[in-house]
Image (cartoon, rainbow, N blue to C red):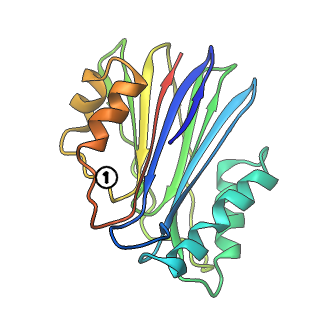
Amino acid sequence: MKYISDESVDVLVYQEAKTGNLDSGDTYYIYKDDDFLLCAIADGLGNGPVAKESADVMPEILANNLNESLDDLLLLCNERMFQKRGAAVAIVRADLKNKTISYSCVGNIKFYMYQSKTDKMIYPLPVMGYLSGRKQKFRTQTYSYSEKDKFLMHSDGVELKNPKETLKRANSTKCLYESLIDIIKHGDDATFIAGSLL
């Protein structure tokens, strides 16, 4: 479990490999400074070491290109996937000064943001497919956020039947984290990043 908490964000990360595997085919990346929070999940196709090899491209790219746009980060990840198995990749950047959150994704990684003041759920649709080195379209979507809004991104090892109720009921990031632990599918790699914007 990774935990980041200060006056602007409260974030918890969970990761577990598929039952019987030593290596997870998922990986994640988190970076936080005074200006922004950057979170990402990569889900390598399949599982085990070959999936991990593809997923591990993402954290290296992000760590070395923190100020690039989300679509440019995905483009760089895509270029590095050439002759690898490939991966679904989702990246979220919260602009802590302007109170906006941006999302771009290729593949089946889900992202939700619950807006507590309006009781609305934002669920941007990802671009279908996966990064494999082939030409791919990207589409960054940006939303405003308010104090106490919550977000969740997860790989397909987490299966949520009612995301809005799950986020709405959780009165803290820790509560959200604990509610998700109960629904992990141990037959797949599972990763999620749960956060509150303070």
The answer to which image quadrant residue 101 occupies is top right
Q: Nearer the viewer, residue 33 or 179?
A: 179
Tell me what residue is drawn at x 44 percent, y 70 percent: 129
Q: Which residue is drawn at 63% across and 18% down?
A: 6
Residue 196 versus residue 132: which sits nearer the camera? 196
Q: Would you identify the image quadrant in which residue 32 lies?
A: top right
x, y percent for residue 1? 50, 42
- Return the residue found at the far bottom: 83
Q: How many marks?
A: 1
Closer to the camera in the image, 4 or 33: 4
- From the viewer's perspective, is 65 left or right of 157? right
Work out whether residue 98 can be spotted: yes
Taking the spot 45% from the left edge, 60% from the top edge, the residue there is: 127
Drawn side of residue 196 relative to residue 58, left or right: left
Q: In this view, does 191 lie to the left or right of 38?
A: left
Residue 90 in sight from this viewpoint: no
Q: Is 143 drawn above or below residue 190 in the view shown?
A: above
The residue that mark 1 highlights is: 158
Q: Quadrant of the C terminus?
A: top right
Extreme-left residue of the structure? 161
Percent position (x, y) of residue 124? 41, 44
Callout 1: SS: loop
Above or below residue 75? Residue 20 is below
> The residue under label 1 is which amino acid type?
Val
Pointer 1 local density, CA inside 10 Å: few below 14, some 14–19, many at least 20: many
> As displayed, is residue 170 above or below residue 58?
above
Q: In this view, does 37 lie to the left or right of 141?
A: right
Residue at image point 48% right, 30% down: 195
Nearer to the camera, 178 or 138 = 178
Please provide percent x and percent y for residue 46.
41, 77
Which x, y percent locates residue 144? Answer: 52, 24
